[in-house]
Image (spheres, rainbow, N blue to C red):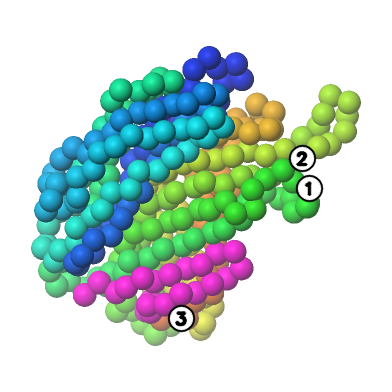
Amino acid sequence: MMLTVAPNARAADLTVGDSGVVEGNGGTRSVEIVVALSTPATAPVTVDYTTRDGSAAAGADYQAARGTVAFAKGEIVKRITVNIVGDTVIEPNETFDIVFSNASGATVARGTGTTTIINDDRAAEPLSMYEVRLTYTGYTGDLTADDCPVRRDGKVVMTGIISGNERVARDDDIGYQGTLQLAVDLDACDVYRKTNGEDDLCKVTIIALGSITTKLAVHVDDRGGYVQTADGTGKFPLSLFFGSCPADRIADERSTFPDNSGANIFNGYELRIPSGPLRVGRYPEGDVVFEVVRAIP
């Protein structure tokens, strides 16, 4: 479901996104579920929510939650936090839902969002597995002008589990692959031609959440690594595009998302990481931080 702001929309659409989180081996970890309006609220908007079991069971796999999401005037995004219960049981991925009810001030366009608890326990196998996280902070676009009307602290985060065969020749690259969760909440800066013929700067805000196939190659000879993503089309049930740019500019950004969009900053990104098998650690490079959170035994 792709949401685009209509210039004279009478009522905002309300959408809950899907999400994913690695389970963990004990204790709890939290996952955020994004709730978005198709246009900034012009008056208070509220909607009730509750969790609902899928293949995951409340109490055993996650902590049940219920409450009310409230948007004040001008707000467009809110987040629901749910705690996940870790264990060491070898099991399939499990899911639960967030379900909306009693909406006021907006129309529910998508009222059920599914969260996938990604299993990180396994029997012995030849592939090595790691939990990873990539984080970009800033804004995108070809322009760096100080007066570009964008947020400077937008974020793109990609998380999940990748696996690969590390038993390769010493002069071969090591390849890893996984389906990772891509969360985008940032602005893109663009230039457009005004009716008087002058150029001006504008912004497109992109808010999106979904899964995307990701490959990571670690090169030999300390040449770092390389990230490549693909096959994201149709897997982003929450994708919102709006801003001060003309409609055709916003449409261009929407049509290229996520595989060829600047909002997917990680596609084609070169990482400065040690050669050889991945090592747990934090590897900053400019506005991007690559973290190998843990090796999965």
Which disc, if any, is residue 291?
none
**Secondary structure type for disc 2:** strand
Closest to the observer: 40 or 259?
40
Res 248 quadrant in image: top right
What's the magenta region? 277-297
By secondary structure, the bulk of the magenta-drawn segment is best described as: strand
Q: Position of residue 208 (x, y in %)?
A: 46, 41
Does residue 263 appear left or right of residue 216 in this picture? right
Marks 3 and 2 sit apart, C-alpha to C-alpha, by 41 Å
Label 1: few (<14), some or many (≥20) within 10 Å?
few
Q: Could you tell which of marks 1 and 2 lies nearer the N-terminus?
A: 1
Res 171 quadrant in image: bottom left
Residue 163 against residue 34 in the figure, above or below: below
Marks 1 and 2 sit apart, C-alpha to C-alpha, by 8 Å
Query: Tag count in the figure?
Result: 3
Residue 116 highlighted magenta (yes or no): no
**Secondary structure type for disc 1:** loop
Give the amino acid type for the residue marked by disc 3 in the picture. Ser
**Secondary structure type for disc 3:** loop
Residue at left 69%, top 33%? 245
Residue at left 64%, top 45%? 188
Q: Position of residue 228 (x, y in %)?
A: 47, 58
Residue at left 19%, top 50%? 63
Can residue 119 be seen from the camera position used here? no
Q: Could you tell which of marks 3 and 2 lies nearer the N-terminus?
A: 2
Which disc, if any, is residue 275?
3
Which disc, if any, is residue 147?
1
